[in-house]
Amino acid sequence: MKVHHYSFVFLFFLLFVSCEEVIDVDLNEADPRYVIEAQLSDFDNEQRIRVSKTVAFTEAVNSLPVEGATVVVIDGRGRSYRFSYDENGYYVNRNFRPTINDTYTLNVDIDDEHFEAISTMPEYVEVDSIGIMEENIFDETYYFATFKFNDPAEVSNYYRYDISINGGNFRFASALSDKFNDGLYVTHQISDLDTDLVVGDEVLVRRYCVDKPVFDYWNEYQSTNPGTAAPGNPTSNISNNALGYFSVATVQEFMLRVEESVPALEP
């Protein structure tokens, strides 16, 4: 059994059941589309944006990296930050750290096609306590990285979590909002979508505060049936029918370890 993350403040679990419509799609004949993955943050001064192109469903690779694009980010004061090509579709700027409450515009030009997106960096909502929570569900033991904090009242807040287990690559874990717990003391329980945590695991979590369009993208992503052979693409905040997303977020990183006897949450 696979257990996923939960967000609650004295709430009961809700179970949603959806119907799936079977749609015949000729994946091999679909027109290639550009994919722009732009996760910028205040983690450090190096920002990376990947530009690629979709391939046929039967191809051995997931995407083709795109070279020769012009990638520029412009801040609210009109200052431009140009990204240079590095490798494997990644464009890099090593001297750019976004600032809170500023709005940024992404411009990507590929041949005669132009793509644009806007994202605003929100303030970071500090964590009050962190830890590993052990829960027994249907006689099985599961572990969750747990974050407790006060959600700011009368402000819409959106959160995204990425997780790395035992030094592996970071993977998306969860997107959550304060729609039902605005201004309350909140608990977020985070786990890997594909791998259960076990005793001895070292867990590195990146906790982002994102704007609403980015939350909508990842919320739609996590709502897609992972068992579908060809799941739908989340609605992008990038123009001109591009896939992917543009996010400028505040972030903090947390290291946790799953112990044999789970201690109380650290203050």
Image (cartoon, rainbow, N blue to C red):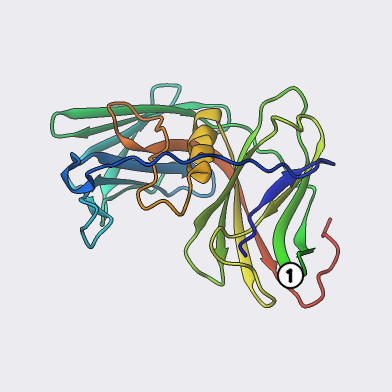
Nearer-the-camera pick, 5 or 116: 5
Quarter residue 132 falls in: bottom right
How many numbered marks are there? 1
Residue 74 picture location, percent across and down: 38, 28
**Residue sitting at the far left:** 111
Nearer-the-camera pick, 123 or 239: 239
Give the residue displayed 81% in from the left and 40% down from the top: 11
Would you say residue 98 is visible in this rendering? no
Q: Is residue 27 left or right of residue 118?
A: left
Residue 262 picture location, percent across and down: 81, 70
Q: Secondary structure at mark 1?
A: strand
Give the residue displayed 66% in from the left and 26% down from the top: 156
Inspect the image, locate mark 1, and give the three-letter code of the amino acid beneath it.
Answer: Glu
Q: Is residue 188 left or right of residue 68?
A: right
Give the answer, above or below, for where 117 lies relative to 200.
Answer: above
Quarter residue 219 falls in: top right
Give the answer, above or below, for where 261 lies relative to 160.
Answer: below
Give the residue displayed 38% in from the left and 28% down from the top: 117
**Dot 1 alpha-carbon crowd within 10 angstroms: few under 14, some 14 to 19, many 20 or more:** few
Would you say residue 139 is visible in this rendering? yes
Residue 237 picture location, percent across and down: 41, 29
- Tell me the quarter of the image containing the C terminus: bottom right
Residue carrying label 1: 140
- Tell me the quarter of the image containing the N terminus: bottom right
Give the answer, above or below, for where 16 lies relative to 180.
Answer: below
